[in-house]
Image (tube, grey):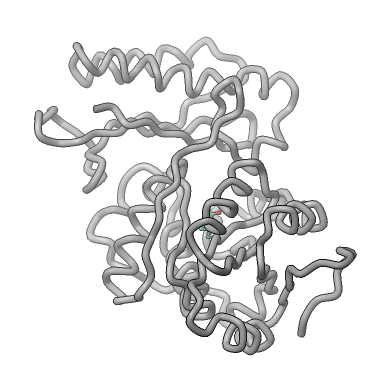
């Protein structure tokens, strides 16, 4: 079934069911290339830039909008996840997006609303995986389902969720799914705050304080050049102690490939700093390449 939207003269097609989507894809994709941009909606400029990039690199582009229940460890985070469907569809239309998939949980999970278990070889045991139990099983489950439903040539994932990106690469390799995972750099607001759908839930005071997260990452990158790990970590911890709006959940320096937290710095390895901060109930994450 194609959903009738309040979008006039639109070439973009919106689908709620797997069957209707697959029927159209089987007619329209043929020898063309298809790029997939999976999202949970509440689209911002960062998402739209990814869709435009996908449009440049593929003949056809599909965006999925689905707030995946199995990747939320806290029910209130799932329930409060922002939804701006009509605005999302209008914005996608303007990018030249070809197809949008907006399934229900029932349609995707077919009565079995649970995540599969994956062995990511330790990639999921640190940082986000440590603080959000079973989060990555939920992410990998839905992304695998989306890949199998849409069969894209390329799929795009933002580096803001760097650990997610590495886990999806691993899942695709383990499951031998023929899709190229394209990493996309972090989009930032003018003041440096990483773009996120969650930002619209910040109060004025929290929004004012939030750029401190990226400022701290930048400073940690400078400190990383000449100081030991402990000094960098202590510096970051202290930065948030006096902060009334932001509470540090974790700061970690890890190998960019294995995501193993660094205990010493090896000159031939690449490292990234990862941070998670609470602004009230809203959890914000960011990361930066250190070398
Ligand atoms: O990064 C996200 O928005 C989500 O984790 C994803 C990849 C769409 C899966 O639900």
Q: Residue at x 28, y 27 (%)?
A: 290
Q: Is there any visible trace of residue 111 in the rendered image?
A: no
Above or below residue 264? Residue 19 is below
Can you say which quadrant of the picture contains the C terminus? top left
Q: Residue at x 75, y 22 (%)?
A: 204
Above or below residue 220? Residue 168 is below
Q: Position of residue 192 (x, y in %)?
A: 54, 23
The residue lying toward the viewer, choosing from 200 and 43, is: 43
Above or below residue 24? Residue 291 is above
Query: Residue 206's image quarter?
Result: top right
Q: Residue at x 60, y 85 (%)?
A: 22
- In the image as oriented, which residue stretches furthest toward the left? 267
Query: Residue 177's image quarter?
Result: bottom left
The residue lying toward the viewer, choosing from 257 and 48, is: 48
Q: Position of residue 150 (x, y in %)?
A: 53, 77
Q: Position of residue 9 (x, y in %)?
A: 86, 67
The residue lying toward the viewer, choosing from 3 and 263, is: 3
Above or below residue 150? Residue 236 is above
Q: Position of residue 78 (x, y in %)?
A: 65, 54
Relative to 72, 104 lies left or right: right
Q: How many numbered discs?
A: 0
Q: Is there any visible trace of residue 277 in the rendered image?
A: yes
Can you say which quadrant of the picture contains the N terminus? bottom right
Relative to 58, 290 lies left or right: left
Q: Residue at x 28, y 31 (%)?
A: 253
């Amino acid at each position: 079934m194609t959903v009738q939207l309040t979008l006039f003269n639109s070439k973009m097609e919106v689908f709620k069911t797997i069957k209707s989507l697959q029927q159209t894809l089987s007619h329209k994709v043929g020898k063309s290339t298809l790029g997939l941009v999976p999202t949970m909606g509440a689209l911002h400029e960062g998402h739209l830039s990814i869709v435009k990039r996908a449009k440049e690199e593929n003949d056809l582009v599909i965006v999925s909008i689905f707030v995946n229940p199995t990747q939320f460890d806290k029910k209130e985070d799932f329930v409060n996840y922002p939804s701006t469907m009509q605005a999302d569809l209008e914005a996608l239309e303007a990018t030249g997006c070809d197809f949008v998939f907006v399934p229900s949980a029932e349609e995707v999970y077919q009565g079995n609303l649970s995540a599969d278990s994956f062995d990511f070889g330790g990639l999921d045991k640190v940082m986000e995986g440590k603080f959000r139990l079973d989060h990555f099983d939920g992410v990998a489950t839905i992304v695998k389902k989306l890949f199998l439903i849409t069969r894209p040539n390329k799929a795009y994932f933002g580096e803001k969720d760097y650990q997610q990106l590495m886990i999806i690469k691993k899942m695709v390799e383990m499951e031998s799914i023929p899709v190229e995972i394209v990493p996309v750099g972090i989009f930032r607001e003018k003041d440096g705050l990483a773009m996120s759908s969650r930002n619209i839930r910040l109060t004025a005071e929290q929004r004012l304080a939030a750029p401190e997260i990226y400022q701290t990452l930048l400073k940690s990158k400078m400190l990383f050049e000449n100081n030991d790990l402990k000094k960098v970590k202590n510096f970051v911890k202290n930065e948030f102690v006096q902060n009334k709006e932001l509470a540090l959940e974790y700061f970690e320096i890890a190998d960019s490939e294995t995501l193993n937290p660094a205990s010493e710095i090896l000159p031939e390895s690449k490292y990234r700093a990862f941070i998670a901060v609470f602004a009230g109930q809203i959890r914000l994450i960011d990361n930066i390449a250190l070398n």
